[in-house]
Image: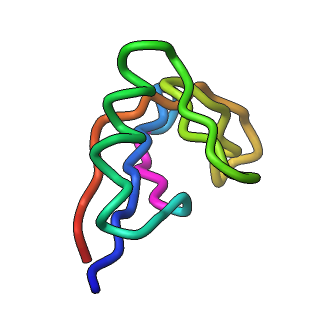
Amino acid sequence: MKEAQFQYKCRMCGEIDNSLCCGEDYAQQRFIEAILTGKSMHNDHSVNMIWTHTCKDGSTGVTDLIGYKLI
């Protein structure tokens, strides 16, 4: 079974964070819920349209959900 890695791009530094993941079977539903409502909450993990990111230089930026990749 494949894993879906949600991709967040930082507005400050441009880095892509893919630390949030779930099973392939649930990814599209969570992605669409996040688009429509701003957040998809299942169990202890949520997929948000925006989040925060700590940049390598110590700055903090805002990230945007840009999609997910199947790995």
| Snapshot quadrant of residue 1 | bottom left
- Residue placed most toward the observer, 33 or 63: 33
Question: In the picture, which quadrant includes the C terminus?
Answer: bottom left
Q: Is residue 38 above or below residue 3?
A: above
- The answer to whether 28 is drawn above or below residue 38 in the figure is below
Q: Nearer the viewer, residue 36 or 51?
A: 36
x 27%, y 80%: residue: 2
Q: Residue furthest left?
A: 70
Lateral position of residue 7 relative to residue 12, left or right: left
Quarter of the image holding residue 18? bottom left
Q: Residue at x 38, y 62 (%)?
A: 5
Residue at 48% x, 13% y: name it.
37
Front residue of this view, candidates 9 and 13: 9
Q: Is residue 57 left or right of residue 64?
A: right
Is 30 situated above or below 38? below
The colour style of the image is: rainbow
- State yes or no: residue 16 in magenta: yes
Q: How many marks?
A: 0
Residue located 55% across and 63% down the image = 19
**Residue 62 placed where, x, y %?**
59, 25
Q: Main secondary structure of the magenta part?
A: loop
The spot of residue 70 in percent (x, y) is 23, 68
Percent across and percent down for residue 26 are 38, 56
Q: Position of residue 6 (x, y in %)?
A: 40, 52
The magenta-colored residue range is 14-18
> With 24 as the anchor, is 19 left or right in this view?
right
